[in-house]
Image (spheres, rainbow, N blue to C red):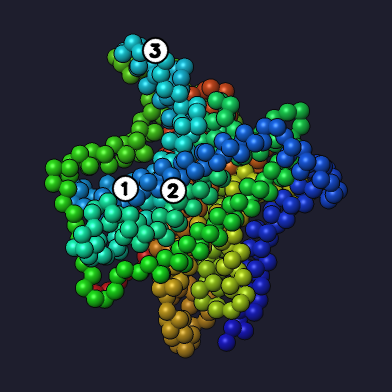
Amino acid sequence: MYAKHSKLTPTLIAIVGFLTVCPVAMLVIGSFSTNLGTLGGFTLDKYIEAYTDPELLGIIVNTLIFVLGSSFLATALALFLSYLNNRTDIPFKFMFRVISIIPMMIPHILFSVSWVLLLNPSNGIINLFLRQVLGMEGGLNVYSLEGMILVEGLLDLPIAYLIIAPAMASFDVALEESSRVCGGTPLRTLFRITLPVLRPAIMAAFILSLVRSLASFAVPSVIGMPGRIYVLSTHIYRAVSTGFSADYGKAAALGMVVLASSITLIYLYRFMTRESEKYVTISSRGYRPTVIRLKGARYPMFAVVGLLSFVLIVLPVLVLFYTSMVPYSMVPSAKAFSMMSWRHWLAVINDPISLLSLKNSVILGVGGATLGIFLSIFVAYVIVKVRTPASGLLESLSFLSFSFPGIVIGVGFMWFFVQTPLYATLWALLIGYIATYLPYGVRPLASAFVQVHSHLEESSLVCGASRVQTMRRIVIPLLVPGIVSGWILMATMFVRELTLSVVLSRPGTEVLAVQILRFSEDGLWGRLSALGIIMIFISTALVVLASWVGAKFKPVQEE
């Protein structure tokens, strides 16, 4: 029955296996090598150097505090918002959809920079206001572990919310009502009924937040490094970017523990999501969602949600645009508005490296996402439609890269590309991007393929259509929503990508996120803000354009 797939499946396994296994294998080999020029010369020197470093213990402690703190904050906020949205009569519930979707369009590095512009201890807008207007001494310092935890927690909030909210929506409150009838207090009911039933979703959100914060580079580099607070990701970055020469052997040795931790957490996450079936509370028997009336607390609670929406969406863009227009950091005032100009924008437009980074990011975003989604269509097809052990292997390989921390896998790819003509080219970045973000294309397409019954394809073939015609006229039109969703996800990820790019990018292959990081390191906040607004505009334009194209080609449903 599956003879026709005898070549397709092994070919895809070879391609996806190369994209996902190759950088890991090269990372392992590189960790036992002295430097990029002596690949394969076995030595333990880099492990000894990396793990006997007296700084390492403090860096591991910082990493644990940062990862656990930000994950706890993101999960707690997501649980609070999910409860308000699904269980209460809070007004304007559309705000929750905004919180879960829109922040993903703001690159992490720009969100981090916006908080630096607000809370920089020397000239942050809020600190300037506290000193100049209120006459307060000192101020708030974002260059701290607390500042890193706050910003990373807010960045991971949308993902945690998307995991917890569906579980909260499907929770049968009859269980809670039974507890109260039996004399349970609200607090006892919360800890003995509600939270245990939601435990798989809460743990899944927490673990995924752990993975994201462990792999995070934007917040530790923009906020942590200026305050001399280093975590594992920035410690690896220092190994390949500072000193007389880059030490990729030491970076690979350090990266092994990060990669192993991340893969372990991802498999724990998948185990927790599978375990959620044991906690089903909805059956066909009398399920009814009950809304809790907040009464006088409705609008105060909505104000909290509105404040979070402002902080997550409006504030970063507002701060960046304001900073791009004023000559230097200053409190908003009549004087500040009178001094506004386009000088920073003109400086960016006339900067050849900024223009090159803009061009490279657009090429990688549009071209890379198109190639990535093309590969994802075939991978998703085999995963869903070809039920063989080989297709199961392909599924495992395609989602393996989801656990890859960008900067670690970038080091692995560097060990590979330096041996090939692809080194220091856009092709190296393109391959690295597709390898890292392939699950973002496969996941929505796999969901779309599930909805396409095999009878449709069989009917087309029986009527004389070829397989190519069947794919073009039957299957692809039905996949348009999944294709658009996957393309949007991959394109926006490619345009904003930082962690892989800081390792693989070389002169001539600069991208927007790397150029923004350079501006941050040089303190050129005005130029950074102008380029950041352009970056957000490009991401938004790609989303709007892809949505429009998807709507044009979506099959019309006849009534």
Q: Give the mark nearest the N terminus, 1 or 2.
A: 1
Category of crowding for the residue at label 1, using alpha-carbon neighbours closer than 10 angstroms: few (below 14), some (14–19), many (at least 20): some
Distance CA(mark 1)–CA(mark 2): 32 Å
* 421 to the left or right of 119: right
Q: Which residue occupies the foreground of this view, 194 or 101? A: 194
Residue 419 position within the rendered picture, expressed as x and y whole percent measured from the top left: 78, 48
**Secondary structure category for the residue under label 2:** helix
297 versus 550 height, above or below: above
Which residue is labeled 2 in the image?
542
**Secondary structure category for the residue under label 1:** helix
Locate residue 546: give its quadrant.
bottom left
- Amino acid type shown at disc 3: Glu
Which dot, 1 or 2, sits closer to the camera? Answer: 1
Distance CA(mark 1)–CA(mark 3): 35 Å
**Secondary structure category for the residue under label 3:** loop
Which residue is labeled 1 in the image?
80
* 133 to the left or right of 320: left
